[in-house]
Amino acid sequence: MSVRFLPTLSFAKLLAVSIALFALLELLGWPLAILAGIIIGLLASRWRDAVLAGALGCLIGWSLYLMAYGLAAGAAVAKALALLRDFAAITLLLGLALGSLSSSIGFLALDMWRRARARETRAQETEVRGTPETTGT
Amino acid sequence: MKKQALGLTISVALLALIVATAARYLSILDPRWGIWVDTLPAVRSGRRVLHLRGLEGEVLVVWDRWGVPHIFASSEHDLAFAFGYVQAMDRLWQMDLERRLASGRMAELLGEDAFEVDLFFRAVDLRRGAEAIMAELEAGRFPELKAALEAFSAGVNAAMEDMERSGTLPVEYKLLGVKPEPWKPLDTLLVDRLICWGLTGDFDSIYLYKLLEGLQDAFGDEKGYEAVKSLLPPDRPIDEYIIPPGGAVGPAAPSGCLPSSGTQRPVAAAKMTIGSPEGLARLLAWWEKAMSYCSFVQGFEASNNWVVSGALTASGKPILCNDPHLALNVPPTWYEAHLVVRSGEEVKLNVRGVAFPGVPIIIIGRNDHVAWGFTNVGADAIDFYYYVWRSRDEYWYGPEGRWLKVERVSDTIRVRQGGKLVAKHVTLNYTVHGPLIVRWGVRMAVKWLGHYATFEAEALRRYNWARNLEDFVEALRFFQLPAQNHVYADVEGNIAWWACGRYPNRTNLDRSDPLRIWLPYNGSAGEGEWNEDDWIDPPDEVPHLVNPPWGYIVTANNRPASTADYSLVYEIGWTWADYYRARRIRELLEGLVANGGKLTPEDMKTIQNDVFSIPAREFLPYLLDALEAHAVELEVVEREAVEVLASWDYYMRADEAAPTLFAAWLQKLVDAVFNDEFSRAGLEDVKVPISMLEYFVKHPEAGAWWFDDKDTPDVEDRDTIMVRAFKEAVEELRRTIGIERTHPPRPLPPSEWKWGRVHRLKAQHVMGSVLPWLNYPRLSLDGWRHCVNNLGGLDVDHGPSWRQIVDLGGESWCVIPGGQSGNPFSSHYADQLELWASGRYKAMELPERPGDVSEPEALWRLKPKG
């Protein structure tokens, strides 16, 4: 028996939500990426989906900013990337790490909670089945 | 379950590790708030409307293809506001750095390394003068200036707010994790003080004291004194004065001003010593470190300006040229702008030129009536005083005599340490003369003209608005510091020059010997007090020329006049530049007009970029003769080097090898001639007037004492030393650039030791040693020190910081060494650099309407908010 209070999403939907969430919360700065990752983890049905969607969501969500800058100020972005290729790579690596780890945390925390709840529920059901006379009186 | 718990623990641990170790980088690289978003303001195109609180009317800013703002306002208030706004958009970091430096607050940004610099600037108290000026403005003096400073500050703060809101503060703030504080009118005055300090805050008197005392200790009083006098004679035997001999100006000579011979020793040598040689050496090292931080405004004894009357020009109107030689840094020292105030159809102000970032006024430039340019006079605006001490706290003051207590003030310098600011408490000391430096056993007061309220900002404001010679002369009265050689021209055909500034009128001074004027003073005896009721003031009391009949005026930090023509010349300064650049400019001008030729801006471009070396012309024949006489001692590579030098035309071109040989030899010659004596005075790398060395080379009997190497038992003569220096230079070059780095390495002949391989631009950002991508590229450059195109050093870190050619009857031209923008992602970060390095220019137009701006890149419409 599973315990649900959030919907789980297919990987494609999860990735789409992840990109949108990471991009949106980035408006408030990088620390919110952790929150975005945790939410994605909560929405994932599998750990692998959570980690992949978190990593790619953050990577792509953040890249959207660079792409937007590229559209608005192409020459400046080209110059920045030429000057700071390493910085760009580090930015994306950090995004990957933040996205994957925070969504892993979200998924695993929920998963543990679900399992704990499930074990608790099973224990209650066993208890009920083992005492019919008493309950039937 | 255990598996999940382990996974969760590992994920949390890794995330915590990343956040803990990379939080700074995450903030820097944050896609929305980090450095990447600074790409957005790096590109300006199309039209924008900005609503700004504090504006009174609409202002149009047209950005041209070089990133120069052309600001069209309807009032002086709005003009200053908009100028503040656009300056901050391009140069906020630089402005902030300047005010922090002047306030002694660099360590808050840069940490422990800047602590000593902060301590220095607090010790010499740059704030004092800025606050004195502010107090005068608050009291109602110069209300237009005060209003301009306030409007400018409001504009800067509006830009700062916009940048904070949009996350586009300059990348430097993000890299350091700090934010700027609001700009205040006092901050502009602090920038003013910093510039003044950079150009007049020298410790030359201390160097001179140390040299004199050191040489007297090493060689005896008389010999030491003679040696110093031979290096620093009152009148250099080879020189070029701004006023040609016979063109007397200024007030009559005070009695006893002429030099005499003598064997004076600094009075301080006995009980009243300023400090031990070691203490003074550390003091000078402290000064040098502080100056290295404000090198962007340091004078480097080098700038050129000249003005030619319309009688000698093709346009029939004067041409005025200026290239101030300051540090070449990133961003450049200057910010260019074109400022217009219109009221309906009437153009009230139309001025263009450059300002120091943080200053709301064009400092060097032109308007539609007049043009002006500056070189540093090298004024002696700073004096040092030593005392008789009764205790640590009490010193004897004044000829009448009384014991005074040192005033002590507690201060706090905050130092960045690991992301936190740590307070360090210091004590600042003052005597009646000013700040007292107490360190390493040195006790010495510093009196600087910049501690007083001076009003050059008002003078400059008036230059911007001047319509004729009368307006300009009236404004000169307020230009007090740092004394500048003003060249002036106007559309009416006038040309003029003033060594404009306020100079102390020192009292109770033995003027029988100029050395006494230049050395530190005995403060206990009341020596060298400044008469604050009677300064040497512009415009009439300073050396000047108005419409000289010969039709031109040239200044290049050279001496203004002979003692006969201007009797106060030793009072106003003594560290004049060598004659070379001024002579070369004059030679070129006279050559061009010799046969009735008429001068054009193109001629002036050629002169500003001239790389002919007069020292090479004057020294090399003597070297080549000496080498010929010592030919048997020369090795093959040295003989090849001689051939390279012998066929040279004395132009310091990057693609030639002879300049490399000459520059290396001249440096070795200076070392060989002077270091043996200077090292005994505890001084190294002392700058000497090269024209004095030239004189010694041409008159070996006059320089015999210097030529002799005191470190050997023999007595060396000029030729021996010149040949030795040559051999050392060749050997050093052979080791450093004489080998091609192939496998195996291949020796390169001297003809391949090209100047451009060693003489390269080194324009650095203040954070450039850590983040080299902020620096400009290391271009190979023509020129060298003492050339008109004075690109000094091998790592060229100073040179023409702005080139301006104004033809008041034709086209005008200008260029800066780099770009307008301080944003490294902007195309205007360094877009003028190649232009500058190759001696090319951009047009310096004065369009009266926004629609007339050539090659517009973007238009900003600034509108009042609310």
Image (cartoon, coloured by chain):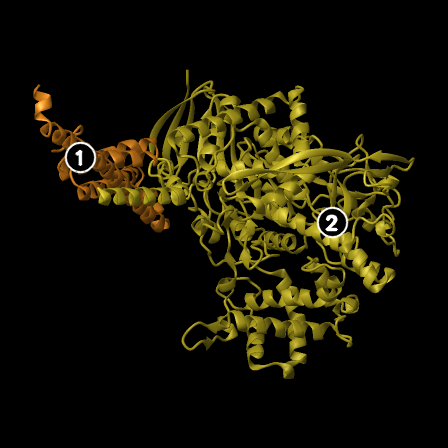
Chain colours: A orange, B yellow
Q: Tell me: A63 left or right of B378.
A: left
Callout 2: SS: loop
Quarter placement of the C terminus of chain B = top left
Q: Tell me: A18 left or right of B425.
A: left
Q: Amino acid at mark 2?
A: Trp
Foreground label between 1 and 2 = 1
Task: Please tell me how crowded label 1 is: few (under 14), some (14-19), or many (20+) other residues with Cα within 10 Å.
Answer: some
Measured as percent of width and height from the top left, residue B215 is found at 80, 60
Mark pair 1, 2: CA separation: 77 Å
Q: Residue furthest right?
A: B400
Callout 1: SS: helix
**x 50%, y 24%: residue:** B154
Measured as percent of width and height from the top left, residue B849 is found at 42, 28
**Is B742 in front, or is B25?**
B25
Q: Is residue B358 visible?
A: yes
**x 52%, y 73%: residue:** B750
Measured as percent of width and height from the top left, residue B807 is found at 53, 41
Q: Which mark is residue A119?
A: 1
Residue annotated with mark 2:
B440
Quarter placement of the N terminus of chain B = top left
Relative height, residue B221 to residue B841 (above, below): below
**Is B181 in front, or is B352?**
B181
Q: Amino acid at mark 1?
A: Arg
Relative height, residue B226 to residue B731 (above, below): above
